Amino acid sequence: MTNSSCALNRYGVLNELGFRYDPSNIYQQVIDSVLRAGEILELPRHLQLILAQPKNELIVHFPVLMDNGDYRLFKGYRVQHNNILGPYKGGMRFHQEVSLDHVKALAVLMTMKTSLVRLPLGGAKGGVQVDPHAISLDERRRLTRRFTAALGNNIGPDIDIPAPDVGTNAQIMAWMADTYINTGPEHDWEGMSVVTGKPLAFGGSHGREKATGQGLVYVLDEMLPVLGMSMDTMSFSLIGYGNVGSWTGRLLAERGAHMRAVMDHTGAIIATSTGTQGENVGGGIDTIALAEHVQKTGGVAGFAGAEALSIDDFYALDVDLFIPAALEQMVDEKRAAQLQCKVVVEGANAPMTPQGEQVLFQRGITVLPAILCNVGGVTVSYLEWQQNRTATTWSEADVDRVLREHVVVGAKHVHEAAKKYDCDLRTAAYISALQNISAVYMLRGIFP
Ligand code: NAD
């Protein structure tokens, strides 16, 4: 298929489903990119249609008692995109900007991610429209329990298995599991595998907290040599110092890389080892001390071991790797034009717009796609679910070993597809994921 007939076909699919073209819509951005890969692969039209919309989109409204005695009504989402490979799987986000299209986009990426590394899981995502930092711990607990109860039997160990994401953590997962055990069909210990990313003392897995960062480092082990780069001598900057960002920073520093700058919602900082002309004069930000500072204060601003930096200077910093590990759509055309890195490593989901990506391609900057780079989280979630269901506990070394095996498989698939179809790495990752999904659809057929 030529490029223009590809575009006509995929807009045909989106038209048939009633989409109104909006280039700034994150769901349309993601699905367009997936369908483009489907067209290169000559994916049957009925599979393109099926994958262009999630199977289920659940919206719940539920009241929560606030500390001051008032009730507030919250909006929660769970989008189940596809389960041809296994139970739906994906994170739960607490953030004030959570919206249906946002959650839909993230759910598609989960379907692609689990398929790329050949996990027997589908794709889902959910969340609540709330700023979790603006409510108390008790309010968060009541909100989590009421949201879980509202989801009812739409989630379950064989149905749909949530996990932490932006604004949620192991404690939230513990409350979700406890609520499910007390209200769902599985009232015994089996009920706890309804969620992953739980605390270690309550069915969690060794290595889950650092899993996404660890997976990203394993991805770099596979991808950097092909790009002629070596981890122990390189420099990097990070957006986000939460779960993904802080573990990526710490684990890369352990391997000898230098973290030159970090930006989060509180501002940007740069290593004091940076020279007056912006050059690296050795060392980098102390990644462990910064993680402790963020734990205490909530953000990177004010960290004593670094200097404040403007947002424009942060993006324009000369580094080997630029790693967005915060929110979606942060790297647009303007930011892409500012970047002075060799490789963008997508720690976050969909951190750049298609327009930003085009600028990077024109400038010859390699992009390592999110569905490969951050696959460590869902992979170790899968291992946690396996441990819960077989009542076993694996060592961290065993978890890391199996994680690496899945990452190696994913990276191999991306390399092979990029070579065979002569395409960029994101398209290659989607092609490989779609090949796997399509093979299972062909075997199972479409019910009835
Ligand atoms: P988190 O809540 O732990 O951290 C989010 C980070 O983003 C924080 O450092 C916050 O300061 C920063 N941030 C928020 N708003 C910002 C802004 N406007 N400018 C700059 N920084 C901002 O979340 P996380 O779990 O680390 O998730 C980060 C990304 O990784 C998300 O895209 C998430 O979907 C993805 N992801 C997470 C996991 C996981 O296991 N946690 C797995 C796969 C993918």
Image: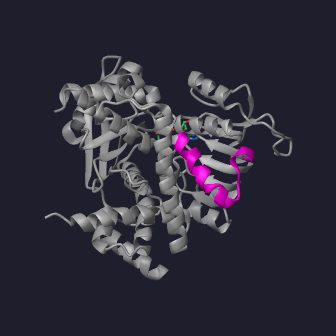
Q: Tell which of 334 and 40 is nearer to you.
A: 40
Relative horizontal placement of residue 422, taking residue 315 as reference (left or right): left
Relative horizontal placement of residue 81, taking residue 187 as reference (left or right): right
Q: Where 256 falls versus 363 (above or below)?
A: above
Magenta-drawn segment: 213-234
Residue 11 position in % (x across, y down) = 38, 73
Residue 186 position in % (x across, y down) = 19, 31
Q: Where 6 falls versus 382 (above or below)?
A: below
User: Which residue is the extreme one toward the right?
Assistant: 276
Relative horizontal placement of residue 207, taking residue 292 as reference (left or right): left
Identified at 63% across, 61% down, the residue is 366
Identified at 26% across, 55% down, the residue is 55
Quarter of the figure that contains the C terminus = bottom left
Count of picture labels: 0
Identified at 35% across, 17% down, the residue is 67
Q: Is residue 220 magenta?
A: yes
